[in-house]
Amino acid sequence: MRWILARAVTVAALVGAGLGPAQAQVAPAGLVYGGAGGYSDHGPAVFHAGGGVQALWEPGIGVLAEVGWVAPFAFPGEGIGLLSLNAIVSVRGARPRSRLRPFITGGYGMAFREGAIHLLNVGGGIDWSLGRVAWRTEVRDHFSLGEVGHFWQVRTGLVWQ
C-alpha cells in the first residue's frame, strides 16, 4: 500500500510542477459510469459501476482517478473493488466546435477485496458534449504483467464540470 501511495504522490507532484501558468485552464470534472465486461480466461459476465474525478488541461492532457465495484451479474455481493489512476489524452478533432471528443487513457490499476492485485489498464472512447455535461462511452482492458488474463469492459456514463 505504501508503494501505491508513494507513486500517486509522485505523479501528483510531477503533474503539479509542470502546470505553471496553465493552472487557470484546468477543467476538473466528476464522473459516474456503469457497464459490462468479462474475463478473457474464465468466469461469468460481470458488471462494473463506479465514479471518479478527472482534471483535464488544454490542449487535452490530464489525470483521472476512479474507483468502482466489479461483480458477476448473478452474485453482486461477490465482487471486488477496482481502483484506476490514469493519464488521459483527449482530442477536440478538426472542427473546433465539435461536440465529439475522442480520448485514450492508461495507467495503474488495483483490484482489491481481502488482498490486492496490481494491474495496468488501457482504454479509449469518446465524450459527446451536451454543454456542461458529456456522455462518455469507453472500452477498457485491465491486465497484469506476466499473466495472460485480461479483464475487459464496455461502459458508459456522464462527465460533468
Image (tube, helix red, strand yellow):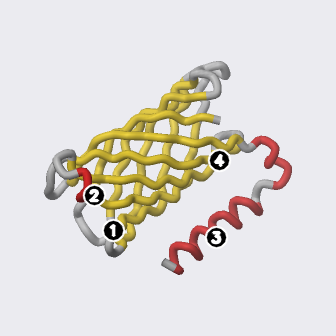
User: Which residue carries the number 3 mark?
Assistant: 9
Quadrant in which the C terminus appears: top right
Q: CA distance from mark 4 to mark 1?
A: 28 Å
User: Which residue carries the number 1 mark?
Assistant: 113
**Crowd class of label 4 (few under 14; some 14 to 19; many from 20; radius 10 Å):** some
Q: Earlier in the sequence, mark 3 or mark 1?
A: 3
Q: Residue furthest right?
A: 21
Give the quadrant of residue 137.
top left
Position of residue 117 relative to residue 93, above or below, is below
Q: Residue 128 bears which disc, if any?
A: none
Which amino acid, by three-letter code, is at mark 4?
Ala
Of residue 93 and residue 54, the one placed in the foreground of this image is 54
* Residue drawn at 65 percent across, 19 percent down: 97
Q: CA distance from mark 3 to mark 1?
A: 23 Å
Give the quadrant of residue 155.
top left
Question: Dot 2 lies on which element?
Answer: loop
